[in-house]
C-alpha cells in the first residue's frame, strides 16, 4: 500500500454497549458488541471509506478484540502497518450505557490496556513522507504522558504544507480548564482546522459565547467548524463571515462517533477543494448517516452512499 495522505493516531478500543435504554453499568444486564471504536480510529476509518489513502498509529493487544479492530481497518482500506500488536496488554474496551434523556455513561478500560501503551517510539518520520493531513484529538493528549508525547512527535514530523485538524474532545471534569488549555496548546496553535463541540470554543478562549470564541480563533487564520449536532454545523473561515449549514433529518439510532465521522468528511472535502459551504454540507451528510446504525463505526458511509444521499436532497 502507498504511504497515506491522511494520518491519525491514538486510542484503539472496542465498544460494548447496553442493549436497552436506562440500564446502568453498575447492574447486571445484557450487552451487545464488540464494535470497533476510538475517536481517531473512527475518524481514519471514515476517511478511508470516503476514498482517501489513510493510515493509523496505535496499539492493540494480541487478542480477539484487537483482531476485531485490525479486521475493520483491513476491510475498509486503512493502512495498519504502524499499529503495534502488544503481548502482555489486552485491547482497550469502552462500556457504554444509553439513557432516555439522550445522555450516555462510559466506563473505559484504556490507560493500562494496549491503547495506553502508545509512545513516541511508535511514531516514525518516514511514515509521514506523503502526509497531507494529520488529525489529533485532546483525549489522546490527556490519557497519559507517553500518548501525549507520541502525538506531539507526530506534529514534529508533518511535512511542509501538510495540514492539521484538532478536535479537543476532552472533558472539563477530567482536568481543570487551565490543564486542558496547557495540554492542548501545541496542537491548537499549529492547527489549520479546529473542530469544537458546544462549549469548547468558550473553554479554549475564555470568550463569553461559542460564537465569539470561534470568531477569535478564526481571526488567527484557522477554519473553525463548530459541531452543533442536530442543528448541523457553523463554519468560521479565516477570511469571511460565519456560515451555518443545517443538519439532515434522519432517525438517530446511535450518536457515538458521529462527530468523528463529520471531522473525517470535512478533511476529505477540504482536501478535494470544496468551498466551506459545500464541505459543511458533505460533512453533515456523513455525520447524519453515521447515527443511523448501532455501533460507532457501523454507520460510517462509503462515498457512493453519501453521494446518493446528497442527490436525494434530504437536507
Image (cartoon, rainbow, N blue to C red):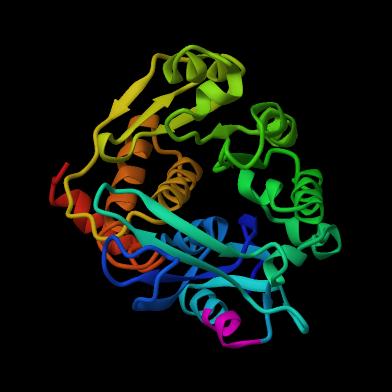
Which residue lies at the image location 38% right of the left edge and 38% below the top edge? 279
Tell me where residue 26 appears, x and y as whole percent: 45, 66
State the residue lying farthest toward the front: 27
The N terminus, quarter of image: bottom right
Identified at 69% across, 71% down, the residue is 113
Is 214 placed left or right of 172 in the picture?
left
- In reply to whether residue 192 is colored magenta, the answer given is no
Q: Could you tell me which residue is drawn at 33 percent across and 52 percent down?
A: 286
On whether residue 67 falls in the magenta region, the answer is yes
- Indicate left or right for 273 with 253 as reference: right
Residue 144 shown left or right of residue 191 in the figure? right
Q: Which residues are magenta?
A: 63-68
Q: Main secondary structure of the magenta part?
A: helix
Is 256 placed left or right of 36 in the picture? left
Q: Is residue 136 visible?
A: no
* Quarter containing the C terminus: top left
Count of marks placed on residues: 0
Percent across and percent down for residue 20 are: 26, 68
Amino acid at each position: 500500500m502507498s504511504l497515506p495522505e491522511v494520518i491519525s493516531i491514538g486510542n484503539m478500543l472496542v465498544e460494548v454497549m447496553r442493549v436497552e435504554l436506562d440500564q446502568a453499568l453498575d447492574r447486571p444486564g445484557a450487552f451487545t458488541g464488540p464494535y470497533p471504536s476510538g475517536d481517531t480510529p473512527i475518524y481514519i476509518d471514515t476517511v478511508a471509506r470516503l476514498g482517501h489513502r489513510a493510515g493509523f498509529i496505535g496499539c492493540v493487544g494480541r487478542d480477539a478484540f484487537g483482531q476485531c479492530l485490525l479486521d475493520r481497518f483491513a476491510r475498509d482500506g486503512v493502512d495498519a502497518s504502524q499499529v503495534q500488536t502488544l503481548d502482555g496488554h489486552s485491547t482497550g474496551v469502552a462500556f457504554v450505557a444509553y439513557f432516555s434523556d439522550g445522555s450516555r455513561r462510559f466506563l473505559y478500560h484504556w490507560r493500562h490496556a494496549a491503547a495506553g501503551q502508545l509512545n513516541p517510539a511508535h511514531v516514525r518520520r518516514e511514515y509521514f513522507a506523503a502526509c497531507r493531513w494529520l488529525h489529533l484529538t485532546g483525549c489522546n493528549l490527556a490519557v497519559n504522558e507517553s500518548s501525549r508525547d507520541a502525538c506531539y512527535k507526530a506534529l514534529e514530523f508533518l511535512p511542509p504544507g501538510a495540514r492539521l485538524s484538532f478536535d479537543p474532545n476532552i472533558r472539563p471534569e477530567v482536568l481543570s480548564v487551565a490543564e486542558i488549555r496547557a495540554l492542548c496548546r501545541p496542537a491548537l496553535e499549529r492547527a489549520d482546522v479546529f473542530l469544537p463541540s458546544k462549549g469548547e470554543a468558550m473553554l479554549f478562549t475564555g470568550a463569553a459565547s461559542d460564537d465569539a470564541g470561534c470568531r477569535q480563533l478564526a481571526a488567527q487564520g484557522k477554519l473553525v467548524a463548530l459541531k452543533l449536532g442536530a442543528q448541523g454545523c457553523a463554519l468560521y473561515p479565516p477570511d469571511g463571515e460565519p456560515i451555518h449549514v443545517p443538519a439532515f433529518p434522519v432517525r438517530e439510532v446511535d450518536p457515538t462517533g458521529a462527530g468523528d465521522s463529520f471531522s473525517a468528511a470535512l478533511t476529505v472535502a477540504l482536501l478535494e477543494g470544496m468551498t466551506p459551504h459545500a464541505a459543511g454540507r458533505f460533512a453533515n451528510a456523513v455525520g447524519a448517516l453515521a447515527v443511523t446504525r448501532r455501533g460507532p463505526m457501523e454507520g460510517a458511509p462509503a462515498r457512493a452512499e453519501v453521494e446518493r444521499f446528497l442527490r436525494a436532497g434530504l437536507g
